[in-house]
Amino acid sequence: MERPDEMVKEGVRVADLLGRLPTFTEYGRYRRELGMKYSEWQIYREFGGNKGSWTAFQYLLMEKIAAA
């Protein structure tokens, strides 16, 4: 389960820069600018690859941020 944890850490980094949860498009833009490991599409597929996958990822980001 290491890969999803790494994805969430990268997502938290983007959320910190934005001051809110990133959209799919925003994540892609920041990923390219920051040279992060996982693409938005890899995250989408890892979290189910269907409607609601990005929302599931955002929920985990929200939990991680709230726990910090």
Image (cartoon, rainbow, N blue to C red):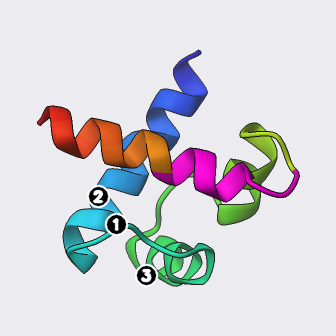
Residue 8 horizontal/vertical position (percent): 44, 42
Q: Residue furthest right?
A: 50
Q: Earlier in the sequence, mark 2 or mark 3?
A: 2
Tell me the mark number nearer the camera, choosing from 1 and 3: 1
Secondary structure mostly taken by the magenta-highlighted segment of the chain: helix
Q: Residue 30 occupies which quadrant of the picture?
A: bottom left
Percent position (x, y) of residue 46? 75, 39
Give the residue number, with chain letter if any, for mark 2.
13
In which quadrant of the rendered image does the N terminus lie?
Answer: top right
Q: Mark 1 is on which residue type?
A: Val
**Decide: marks 2, 1 in contact (CB < 8 A)?**
yes
Considering only vertical position in the picture, is 29 above or below 59? below
Which residue type carries mark 2?
Answer: Arg
**How many residues crowd mark 1 within 10 Å: few (<14), some (14–19), many (20+)?**
many
Is 25 placed above or below 3 here? Answer: below
The residue pinned by badge 3 equals: 33
3 relative position to 60: left or right: right
Which quadrant of the figure has residue 47? top right
Q: Which residue is mark 1?
A: 14
| Residue type, mark 3 in image | Glu
Q: Position of residue 10 (x, y in %)?
A: 40, 51
Q: Residue at x 83, y 58 (%)?
A: 51
The relative height of residue 46 versus residue 29 in the rendered view (above or below) is: above
In this rendered view, identify the residue nearer to me: 40 or 33: 40
The stretch in magenta equals: 50-58
- Does dot 3 land on a helix, a strand or a loop? helix
Q: CA distance from mark 2 to mark 3?
A: 12 Å
Percent from the top left, x then y, of residue 31? 49, 71
